[in-house]
Amino acid sequence: FFFQNTYPFHLHSPPIPTQLKMSAPKADGTGLFIGGQRESGQDVRIGNVTAAVAVANIVKSSLGPVGLDKMLVDDIGDVLITNDGATILAQLEVEHPAARVLVDLAQLQDQEVGDGTTSVVIIAAELLKRGNDLIKNGLHPTTVISGYRIALKAAVAYLKKNMVIKVSDLGDEHLINAAKTSMSSKIIGKESEYFAKLAVDAVKSVKMKASSVDFSNAASNADIASTGTENYKNDSKNRFKYPLSAIHIMKAHGKSSLESHLVDGGFAINAMRAAQGMPTAVEGDSNNDVKIAMLDMNLQRHRMAMGIQVVVKDPAEIENIKKREMDITKERISKIIDAGARVVLTTKGVDDLCMKYFVEAGIICARRCNKDDLKRLAKATGGKVVVTMADMEGNESFDPDCLGRCSAVREERIGDGEMLYVHGCRGGGASTIVLRGANEYMLDEMDRALHDSLCVVKRMLESNTLVVGGGAVEASLSVYLEEFAATLASREQLVIQEFADALLVIPKTLAVNAAKDSSDLVAKMRASHAKSQLNPDEYKDLQNIGLDLVNGTVRNNLSAGVVEPAISKIKSLRFATEAAVTILRIDDRITLNKEQQ
């Protein structure tokens, strides 16, 4: 990948100082030979930390509401413009094994939480850098690792006890604020008010009752269990989940991004009528729903399978064979129509012969639909995707229970092409967000930004807790951990102080990216948090003090609406510490040479 940034760098393994190549083994078996290179001790650590810091420096300038975007150009010239840490790192071809740990870390954060991928990489790299400095100054790696673990435990405990704000009955206001905070650094940050409401409505529209299995999975997750599931335990009947896979995001060129819309209780599918003679809309009434058949099979003239030989003595029989081939397909289609289907969608082809029957029956038929879209539509309309019409007796039949139900299906023109809109789906929750935008790059970036916000809203709804954003949590933990370190009478004291300092990398980077004085702002923030911790009754509100990057001051970020899910912060601290510990434990690396052919 060609990467545009302010300085060139190479994420290859650093030069290997020690090479262990010993002579061929002697007959007595005492010889040692490693067909490769061995690097050990401090050299490995320096190499690993350098590579990890290089990775973090790539994404550092994209952190925060005023972060910059990266342009990635691949070997065939495809361009990707993004601000999302996980996407940037996934596109880079990182060769160094330690740097790859950080790339995997960003992917893990993306899967688990959906947001905070950039900050988790920056914290991990800072912990590594500071841990390495301590080891250089004579501390044993084991002491550093145990110190980091103690610091993490203390930080998470303090966070849950003092910083987490329970939102027993989540109002839309907090959800919208969390979505806006997540979007603030993305391309749609300027229109965050509009898109945040869109994201909240979309996630709420797919609300469904959680089964006991889902709940036990959630409860086994320590972070959610301690921050949110108490609400559920008291009220075991009201447990809900919000499956994001039920939200379908469609991208269509043209118009402005503010023309994007949510098809609530409906579904948009990127397909059009297969023939002009078909109706453009099928409407149901109060008594009769529109029934949709979703097929994963060919509706084409039946052909004999390979290897079948038909010996014909009378030429007139050939005509009968052709006629029978046509009749087989006709029978299939009539069975689908008799079952009550008024819309037929298939993932495979439909030929002209079959089209004729659909046109005559006044049915909308669309071919070459995306299979994943059909599965989502089946879930939304309460139908099933039919793979074959064969039944247990060896005959062909079509079960009416497989049909999906909705109130109307219409073909509407969106951008350059047509789309089928399915309104009033009768099945489980499903909704579609149709994104509009100027070009492909913008639509892709909007999709990524929206995905992050949807994840944040889902986490907030499921765990019922939030923390203040804008560097407030990091500053508060830093102040607390410095106090906590002073209470320990062991060597870990130094390590915990470094851990406390490392957390400040987030507010510092946020301030630097906003072209503000980071030292001044972080000092003000720490002073406020120290006051609130010394005298919590009098200065309770000061613990919500965070950065205001537009005006270059500090403010109460809770009242300003800068909030994020508690689970996001807790998990990013856990993941970053684990990654740093994993890399610091390595003190030897043996790279085997490739065998020569």
Image: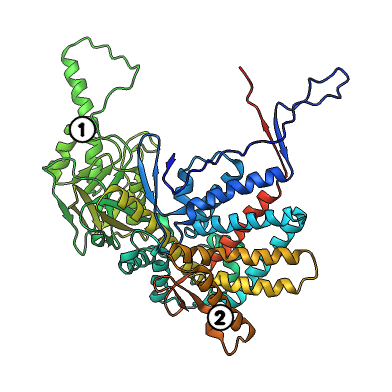
Tell me which residue sits at (68%, 56%) in the image. Answer: 131
Work out whether residue 210 can be spotted.
no
Q: Which residue is mark 2?
A: 528
Q: Is residue 572 left or right of residue 200?
A: right
Q: Count neighbours of disc 2 (C-alpha within 10 A) and say few if under 14, some if 14 to 19, many if 20 or more.
A: many
SS type, badge 1: loop
Q: Nearer the viewer, residue 456 or 352?
A: 456
Hey, which residue is sitting farthest bottom in the picture? 538
Q: Position of residue 126 (x, y in %)?
A: 60, 57
Marks 1/2: CA–CA distance: 72 Å
Sequence-wise, the earlier of marks 1 and 2 is 1
Q: Which residue is mark 1?
A: 351
Query: Colour scheme of this structure image?
Result: rainbow
Q: Nearer the viewer, residue 452 or 265?
A: 452
Task: Answer above or below: position of 155 versus 130.
Answer: below
Q: What's the residue type where badge 1 is placed? A: Asp
| Image quarter of the N terminus | top left
